[in-house]
Amino acid sequence: MQLQTTTVEIKTVKPYYTPEEYLELEEKADYKNEYRDGEIVPMTGGTTNHNKIALNLASRLNLALEDEDYEVYIGDVKLWIPKYRQFTYPDVMVVQGQPVYYGSNTTTIMNPMVIVEVLSKSTRDYDQGDKFIYYRSIAEFKEYIMIDQAKYHVMQYAQSSQGKWLLTEYELEDSLLGLQSIDFKIAFSQIYKRINFSESVE
């Protein structure tokens, strides 16, 4: 008599978290996590190049805008995108006027005008694809800058007066990036100051 074996496939169900549960867990977490419509996704650690590029740009922005009606945020400030139920940590954000906060604390904003992401191998496709779609749902959002940490390459999306998003790419070492929504210019020599491309392995 031959015995028949049956294979039972067990499907694991990902837990669903509310925004409030995510924020409570995030306060106690040892590392950063994004929230994607009920799912909590751990963020990868950044390289020193990633950190330096974000800091180079943010420090120049902060200095240039210190007497203007703008706020510059970097790294630890979260962004809430209500239409797509997303909490994320952009590398750099610029807010015109006063920040609009999510909830009663000052850890999460909702109204950036400019967002900057330093691209990495693990997040490049997401930053250029779905995340840009999510960002475009923010009414105040006017400009998106993506900086490659492995070579001289910056992509700049700026919204026109007709609402179209126009792409400008910069790939030369002596390029000058000029923002469209803010009176601000920065040379690649300043963006990529002290960057060793051979170390960009993120």
Image (tube, rainbow, N blue to C red):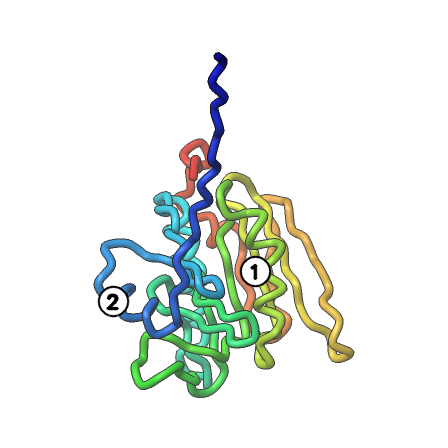
Amino acid tagged 2 = Glu
Q: Residue at x 51, y 76 (%)?
A: 82
| Neighbours of disc 1 within 10 Å: few (<14), some (14-19), many (20+) | some
Residue 102: x and y in percent read: 40, 81
- Kindly report the distance in space between the C-alpha atoms of the residues bearing marks 2 and 1: 23 Å
**Picture residue at 42% right of the left edge, 63% below the top:** 35
- Identify residue for label 1: 131
Report whether 25 appears left or right of 88.
left
Foreground residue, 11 or 168? 11
Q: Which mark is residue 51?
A: none
Q: Is residue 138 above or below residue 200?
A: below
**Badge 2: how crowded within 10 Å, few (<14), some, or many (20+)?**
few
Residue at the spot x=51%, y=40% of the render?
121
Which residue sits furthest top?
Answer: 1
Percent across and percent down for residue 182 are: 57, 75
Residue 75 placement, left or right of 30? right
Cβ–Cβ below 8 Å for labels 2 and 1? no
Residue 153 in percent (x, y) is at: 59, 46
Query: Residue 202's spot in the image, x, y percent?
Result: 43, 39
Counting residues from the start of the chain, the first of labels 2 and 1 encountered is 2
Total label count?
A: 2
Secondary structure of residue under mark 2: helix
The residue carrying mark 2 is 27
At 47% across and 87% down in the image, what residue appears? 97
Q: Quadrant of residue 166?
A: bottom right
Q: Amino acid at mark 1?
A: Lys
Residue toward you, 174 or 122 = 122
